[in-house]
Image: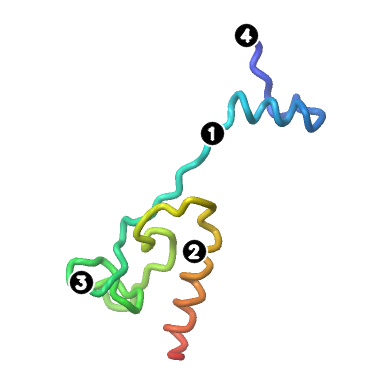
Amino acid sequence: MHRVHPVDCDDPDSGIEYARRFGSAGLHAVGSCAWGPADDDVVDSYLRVRGVAGLRVVDASVLPFQVSGNTAAPVMAVGWIAGDLIAGS
């Protein structure tokens, strides 16, 4: 079987066919740095890493579970929250 290479996709139909046959949904790592008030949460409520001065985590790893859609918007929200926390507002 000849595997179509993406550069061989010269129109939308062949691009869609390539994606259907060889594409996959990527996984976004979330939840590896729990964000919460408990002492065993990696990140405190100000997104600071417990036990490491001057370090914050501001990415999808602080989310408690994989969202059902794209992670871009929730991660942007975490960024906005972090900006407010850092600015002290």
Q: Is residue 9 above or below residue 89?
A: above
Mark 1 neighbour class, 10 Å CA radius: few under 14, some 14 to 19, many 20 or more: few
User: What's the amino acid at mark 4?
Assistant: Met
Rendering quarter of residue 57: bottom left
Quadrant location of the N terminus in the rendered image: top right
Question: Circle 1 sits on which residue?
Answer: 24
Asked whether 13 or 33 is in front, the reply is 13
Query: Type of residue at label 3?
Result: Ala
Mark closer to the observer (4, 3): 3
Question: Could you tell which of marks 1 and 4 lies nearer the N-terminus?
Answer: 4
Q: Residue 75 carries which label?
A: 2
Q: Residue furthest top?
A: 1
Q: How far apart are marks 1 and 4 (CA)?
A: 19 Å
Callout 1 secondary element: loop
Q: Residue 73's spot in the image, x, y percent?
A: 55, 63
Q: Which of marks 2 and 4 is nearer the N terminus?
A: 4
CA–CA distance in space, label 1 to label 2: 22 Å
Residue name at image x 42 percent, y 83 percent: 85
Q: Is residue 46 above or below residue 25?
A: below
Identify the amino acid type marked 2: Val
Dot 4 crowding, Cα within 10 Å, few <14, some 14–19, many 20+: few
Label 1 with label 2: CB-CB less than 8 Å: no
Q: Name the residue under label 4.
A: 1
Amino acid type of the residue tagged 1 in the rendering? Ser
- Looking at the rendered structure, the secondary structure element under dot 3 is loop
Q: Residue 38 carries which label?
A: 3
Give the percent coordinates (x, y) of residue 29.
40, 50
